[in-house]
Image: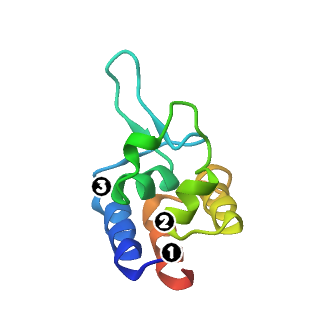
Amino acid sequence: MDKVLKTKWIKALESGDYMQGKSWLRVVSEVGGPITYCCLGVLCEVAGLGDTITNGQQYLDSEQLLKVGLKESQQIKFATFNDNKRMDFMQIASVIDAFI
């Protein structure tokens, strides 16, 4: 992953500007509720791929992964951290900083 994109991703996760959700990259409520993001959805936003996310998309597709420089195995780990381990964005940002 490009160091500039990595830094943007970490800063976005730590910013408090994104409400954490789970299971989907981004969820836009039909009734005007808040937009929620998986940590990978935040990555799509900061990488300029937000317009390529579809409602109900759980993972980045192979083209999106290539554009952000993330491996499929890394994507699965971050989805697990976000959804199953219930790590908050600050904790996930620390993992990104240390291991990506």
Q: Is residue 33 above or below residue 43?
A: above
Give the residue number, with chain letter if any, for mark 2: 68
Q: Look at label 2 and name its amino acid.
A: Val
Residue that lies at the very extreme toward the front in this rendered image: 63
User: Between disc 3 and disc 1, whose residue precedes?
Assistant: 3
What residue do we see at 57% from left, 68% from top?
70
Dot 1 falls on a residue whose secondary structure is helix
Which of 80/100 is in front?
100
- Residue 45 located left or right of residue 59: left
Q: Position of residue 39 (x, y in %)?
A: 49, 55
From the viewer's perspective, is the residue at label 2 or at label 1 nearer? 2
Q: Is residue 16 above or below residue 1?
A: above
Q: Look at label 3 and name its amino acid.
A: Gly
From the viewer's perspective, is the residue at label 2 or at label 3 nearer? 2
Residue 79, located in which quarter of the rendered image? bottom right
Q: Is residue 63 above or below residue 56?
A: below
Q: Which mark is residue 16?
A: 3
The reply to whether the C-beta atoms of the residues labelled 3 and 1 are less than 8 Å apart is: no
Q: Look at label 1 and name its amino acid.
A: Ile
Give the residue number, with chain letter if any, for mark 1: 96
Q: Within 10 Å of the Cα at label 2, are there few (<14), some (14-19), or many (20+) other Cα atoms?
A: some
User: Between disc 2 and disc 1, whose residue precedes?
Assistant: 2
Residue that lies at the very extreme toward the top in this rendered image: 31
Q: How far separated are the C-alphas under marks 3 and 1? A: 17 Å
Dot 3 falls on a residue whose secondary structure is loop
